[in-house]
Amino acid sequence: MRGPRPSPPSQAQGEPPDGAAIAIIRDSGLRYEVGALGTTPEGDDDQVWATLCAAHEAIAGRRRDQRLSHIEVASLDRTIESLTHEFR
């Protein structure tokens, strides 16, 4: 098993690896939550898709040779709050 590797330069300088993507989501006007393992946006399907594409492109623009967006999509008639309230 391999141990931790040094942070890439952008992280070493204090910039979170997903900071650009989260900024896109924040500026979209969508309701969202940032968690330890991901960010959950909530809203109109078209606006969510456009925001996710823009967030991925923001990451891609920084490091064209290394990028990965792991996206799970659920179209539900529920809110983040309705799914999490009993655990808070």
Image: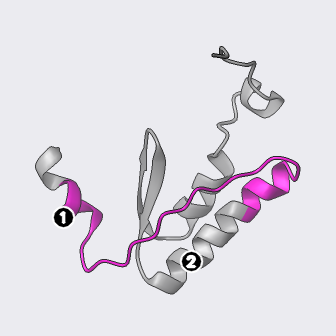
Q: Examine the image and state in which quarter residue 83 appears.
A: bottom left
Q: Find residue 49 and name its label.
A: 2
Q: Residue visible at 11% across and 51% down?
A: 86
The residue range painted magenta reads 57-84
Q: Quadrant of the C terminus?
A: top left
Residue 67 image point, x, y percent = 76, 51
* Residue on which the image places disc 1: 82
Secondary structure at numbered mark 1: helix
Badge 2 vs badge 1, beta-carbon distance below 8 Å = no
Residue 71 image point, x, y percent = 54, 62
Q: Quadrant of the N terminus?
A: top right
Q: Say if 72 sits above or below 68 in the image.
A: below
Residue 67 highlighted magenta (yes or no)? yes
Q: Hey, which residue is sitting farthest front in the picture?
A: 1
Left or right of 29: which side holds 87? left
Q: Say if 38 sits above or below 44 in the image.
A: above
| Tag 1: amino acid | Ser
Q: Residue visible at 37% across and 78% down?
A: 75
- Mark 2 surroundings: few (<14), some (14-19) or many (≥20) residues within 10 A: some
Residue 74 image point, x, y percent = 39, 72
Residue 7 image point, x, y percent = 74, 24
Visual colour scheme: one colour
